Image (tube, rainbow, N blue to C red):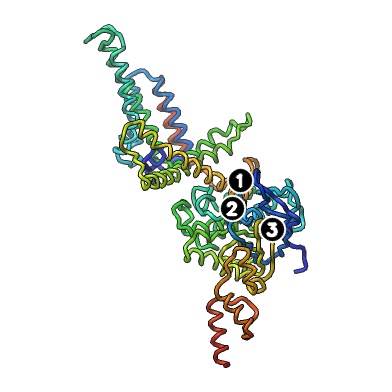
Amino acid sequence: MDKMIFGRYYPGNSFVHRLDPRLKLVVNIMFIVLIFLIKHWYDYALLGGVVIAGVLLSGVSLKFFLRGLRPMLWLILFTVGLQLFFTSGQHVYWQWGVLSLSQEGLINATYIALRFLLIIFMSTLLTLTTQPLAIADGMEYLIRPLKVVHFPVNDVALMLSIALRFVPKLMDETTKIMNAQRARGVDFNNGSLIKRVKALIPLLIPLMMSSLDIATDLTTAMISRGYRDGEGRTRYRILKWQRADSLTLVAFVVITVVAII
Amino acid sequence: MTEQPIIRVKNVTYSYPYADKPALNKINLTIQAGQWVAIVGHNGSGKSTLAKTFNGLIEPQSGEIYFNGKLLNEETVFDVRSKLGIVFQNPDNQFVGATVADDVAFGMENNGVPRDEMITRVEAALRQVHMWDYRHQEPARLSGGQKQRVALAGVLAQRPQVIILDEATSMLDPQGRREIINLMTQLRQDGNFTIISITHDVDEAALTDQLVVIDDGVLVNTGTPSELFADPEQLHRHGLTVPLSARISQQLRTADYALPDRYLNDRQLVDELWTLHSKM
Ligand SMILES: Nc1ncnc2c1ncn2[C@@H]1O[C@H](COP(=O)(O)OP(=O)(O)OP(=O)(O)O)[C@@H](O)[C@H]1O
Ligand SMILES: [Mg+2]
């Protein structure tokens, strides 16, 4: 249960780990945009090189990256399959009704697969080397300009960081309730699909109740510690932009320019 | 102690929405600065509700609260919250920060304390509760007693005048409970805090200067622990257990044995009995 998306941080102190979360977020966003702009194989090679460099610098073993692929595997196979068999082209190798396998299809499918791979590796690099909370902090900085349009940036950031932190707690709570229900003879693992879904209902209701309890307690604690809204708040934890961050950014901008031209 | 009381509760009545009887019924109470006060009463008697009126978490339907002589209202409430800290019962659900140090800083962040100042105060507060070594840890990974100490540090960092512990030790094991109670005793010695303990623990209540007994939203009695423990019958009627030693002392006193007029815990009672015995 606790090996879910948010628990993926891999503690370490590598170059990538030490980079500013804001930088890692910005580079990720730029990277995704870039992936959709490039057209040539050598651009893919360049970006592939960037990802490989990142993976090596992070010091995280490849198997954790591959694990990041797993939840997306079916989506990738499905999309690649679509490209492969539904692209019409000049050089058709094989045809069966609407399905055809052409050279163009093959090339498109390869590119699509590469795009997926590169994007997933890059974002996995972010989540593996950055604590969820640092990501939330980084996001807060990045959405700060929205303050101009009276978007409650501080509140949203706090909400995000609390939500992230309570995920493991809710998991614990779920396990606890599941065990309590098991002790009463509920079977979560066997029976027809409908039966199993039904078994989840006595799980969801107590879970919702206990979440509400936690939320009420937490709100009470926050209010009595003087929380109002973002205005006039100071910050204890701050992000420090360093030389390595500037250099990485410059390097990435150069790569972007090279790839686009 | 003739200066104005730090907290004055005047005729406060409060009912929760849809409740058929008030949780607080015309409460009048005065708490002097520097005192250690225990609020006792059976489950559901209204202790937590009363504490929540002190910092405006709950707004009474009638009556007033004065903090340092100033009426609690929308303008003064944030000032009061920075000077009155509460440690709650459930150690798990009161952490906002991701690390111990972060959490301790939360209250100060809300009050706009400059960062440099926060850094020194976080360290001082964590050292005071002996949790400085844990500053980078996630609060969730701490033991119950450690969690409550961190919560207490969060309150201390705000430099409060009043500290309220709402059954802060009730979910702890005896060891954790002792840690917190020792800390409170120490704080009382070296700071000028007013401490309000909401507690079911008679031994903790016995340490205080003033006991406030609440039953079904009504303040039924207040006095020093020895005054109140002297009448175990009455406490019993309000659903409170009186320590065995207090009951024995009471019986002995009515049987004309010369026991001192204050509350004696088990040890003290045994000592007194030996003294009596040697005089016989
Ligand atoms: N959020 C709420 N909504 C409605 N009623 C409430 C709420 N909180 C408490 N009550 C009711 O108000 C009364 C007083 O509750 P309160 O929590 O103040 O008691 P307490 O003395 O702190 O009890 P305990 O020793 O169990 O903590 C109880 O009858 C309780 O059921
Ligand atoms: Mg209570």
| Subunit under mark 1 | A
Instruction: Respond whether the residues carrying marks 1 and 3 are from the same subunit.
Output: no
Q: Is residue A208 left or right of residue A230?
A: left
Q: Where in the figure is residue B203, as x and y percent of width and height? A: 56, 70
Instruction: Respond whether the residues carrying marks 3 and 2 are from the same subunit.
Output: yes
| Distance CA(mark 1)–CA(mark 3) | 41 Å
As displayed, is residue B33 above or below residue B116?
below
The residue to which callout 1 is attached is A234
Residue kind at label 1, given as amino acid type: Thr
Residue kind at label 3, given as amino acid type: Val
The residue to which callout 2 is attached is B118
Q: Residues within 10 Å of mark 3 (few under 14, many from 20)?
A: some
Label ID, residue B218: 3
* Figure quadrant of the C terminus of chain A: top left
Residue B248, by quadrant, is bottom right
Q: Are marks 2 and 1 in contact (CB under 8 Å)?
A: yes
Q: Are marks 1 and 3 in contact (CB under 8 Å)?
A: no
Q: Where in the figure is residue B92, as x and y percent of width and height? A: 50, 52
Tell me which residue sits at (33%, 42%) in the image: A59
* Ligand 2 found in image quarter: bottom right
